[in-house]
Image (tube, helix red, strand yellow):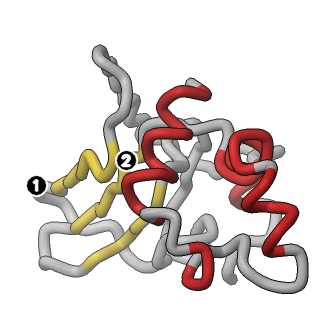
């Protein structure tokens, strides 16, 4: 993982430190300690997936970046952060998944969809839900 970070920092910043996020009053320190600071600033690196949920009326009902490991909930009155509440029309809903940044050789993505009559209590993303 560290080797990947070093390669990415070298390739994308091209050592033009003045335009990098490490530029500033400590510029000489960061330049001198490049490898140590690159790991601190840019790790852990991981795969990044984005998703969009579209209802049968072509309305975007949810959008998220890399939060597949969180439960999202939508109903007529309220919705998780990043989701839009409202009627849940019958028909074909579309879940579009975008592989935004893949760094590992093997990726397995598993998505589970449940239809419940009630909101599941204690779900982090709906603790501060819209009403």
* Vertical relation: 85 (above or below) 97: below
**Disc number at residue 105?**
none
Residue that mark 2 sits on? 49
The percent position of residue 115, horizontal first and vertical second, equals: 42, 41
Picture quarter with the N terminus:
top right
Q: Nearer the viewer, residue 55 or 87?
A: 55
Residue that mark 1 sits on? 92
> Closer to the observer: label 1 or label 2?
2
Q: Nearer the viewer, residue 51 or 56?
A: 51
Picture quarter with the C terminus:
bottom right
Q: Give the number of callouts.
A: 2
Disc nearer the start of the sequence (1/2): 2
- The residue depicted at 43 percent of the width and 79 percent of the height is 86
Q: Secondary structure at mark 2?
A: strand
The percent position of residue 100, horizontal first and vertical second, equals: 30, 52
Quadrant of the image occupied by residue 80: bottom right
* Vertical relation: 9 (above or below) 36: below
Marks 1 and 2, how far apart at CA: 22 Å
Q: Secondary structure at mark 1?
A: loop
- The residue depicted at 55 percent of the width and 55 percent of the height is 73
Disc 1 residue crowd, few under 14, some 14–19, many 20+, Cα 10 Å: few
The percent position of residue 88, horizontal first and vertical second, equals: 33, 67
Q: Horizontal placement of 29 versus 121: left or right?
A: right
Quadrant of the image occupied by residue 70: top right
Q: Nearer the viewer, residue 24 or 122?
A: 24
Disc 2 residue crowd, few under 14, some 14–19, many 20+, Cα 10 Å: some
The percent position of residue 13, horizontal first and vertical second, equals: 47, 65
Q: Nearer the viewer, residue 106 or 12?
A: 12
Q: Horizontal placement of 118 versus 53: left or right?
A: right
């Amino acid at each position: 993982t560290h080797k990947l970070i070093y390669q990415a920092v070298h390739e994308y910043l091209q050592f033009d430190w003045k335009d990098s996020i490490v530029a500033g009053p400590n510029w000489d320190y960061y330049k001198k300690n490049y490898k140590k600071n690159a790991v601190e600033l840019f790790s852990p690196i991981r795969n990044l997936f984005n998703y969009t949920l579209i209802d049968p009326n072509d309305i975007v009902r949810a959008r998220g970046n890399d939060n597949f490991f969180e439960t999202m909930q939508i109903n007529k009155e309220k919705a998780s952060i990043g989701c839009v509440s409202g009627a849940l029309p019958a028909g074909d809903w579309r879940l579009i998944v975008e592989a935004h940044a893949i760094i590992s050789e093997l990726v397995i993505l598993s998505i589970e969809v449940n239809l419940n009559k009630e909101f599941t209590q204690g779900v982090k993303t709906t603790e501060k839900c819209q009403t």
